[in-house]
Amino acid sequence: MNEIRLHNVVPEIFAERKDLQSDIWQRDVTIQRGRSYLISAVSGTGKSSLCSYLYGQRGDYRGEILFDGEDISAYKISRWCNIRQREISILFQDLKLFGELTALQNIEIKNDITHTKTRNEIVALFDEFGIGDKLHSRIDHMSFGQQQRVALIRALCQPFSFLLLDEAISHLDDTNSDIMRDIVMREAKARDAAIIATSIGKHMNIDYDVCLNL
């Protein structure tokens, strides 16, 4: 997949508002593979809604979202499964990790399906993130910042053309934010993938190709 286009998209809840000041809602926006995008927002402007639309979790919007020219509103579940396995990977704001499993087990659930990373590559990412000693720790015994790093490793364990990062560094210090940035940039470059990062204030220090205000 090479392009995502939003044409006059607006959440149903905002559809009748006349005071929207947005670079995305009710605009024509194109997101291209291989480029980096920062979407800045304040609470209540629909950031979580936008992520859900792009990932196919919700459809309560007006307008058109097009993947390579195809309207996604007609996609069946099987098509969405394929897109989520091969085209769009996401780091959710609420992470969606399994608390009763270890950090490594959370990664293996996906990687055993996709066979994207070797065990040594996964361990190397844990070490690079400074959580090599947490491989066998239960997720619910780890801090939220540590969990964010595990969630990113999981997001990288699949092919993707677009990497959606929803407030990826909200609980990371500057050092770990920079480590995440370096890993994200390296992995996106290897796949010629787009980075779509959302933020309500704190964001990765990337020289973004496009900055949009939601």
Image (cartoon, rainbow, N blue to C red):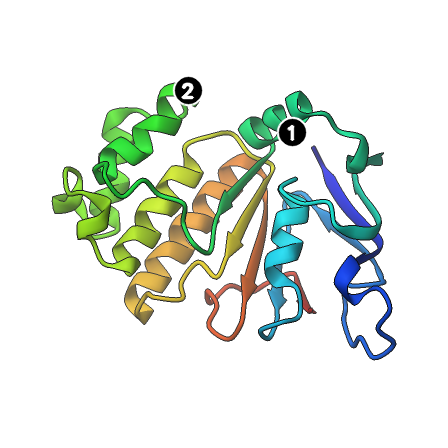
Indicate the position of residue 206 as horizontal and vertical percent values: 51, 63
Indicate the position of residue 12 as horizontal and vertical percent values: 79, 58
Label 1 residue SS: helix
Indicate the position of residue 78 as horizontal and vertical percent values: 65, 21
Q: Which label sits in the foreground, 1 or 2?
A: 1
Residue 80 disc label: 1
Q: Quadrant of the C terminus?
A: bottom right
> Is residue 68 in view from this perspective?
no
Q: Which residue is mark 2?
A: 113
Residue 187 disc label: none
- The amino acid type, in three-letter code, at marker 2 is Ile
> On the rendered structure, is 98 left or right of 113?
left
Look at 50% across and 37% down and name the residue there: 190
Label 2 residue SS: helix
- The amino acid type, in three-letter code, at marker 1 is Trp
The one nearer the camera, 53 or 155, is 53
Look at 41% across and 25% down and name the residue there: 116
> Is residue 13 in view from this perspective?
yes
**Mark-to-mark CA distance, 1 and 2:** 16 Å
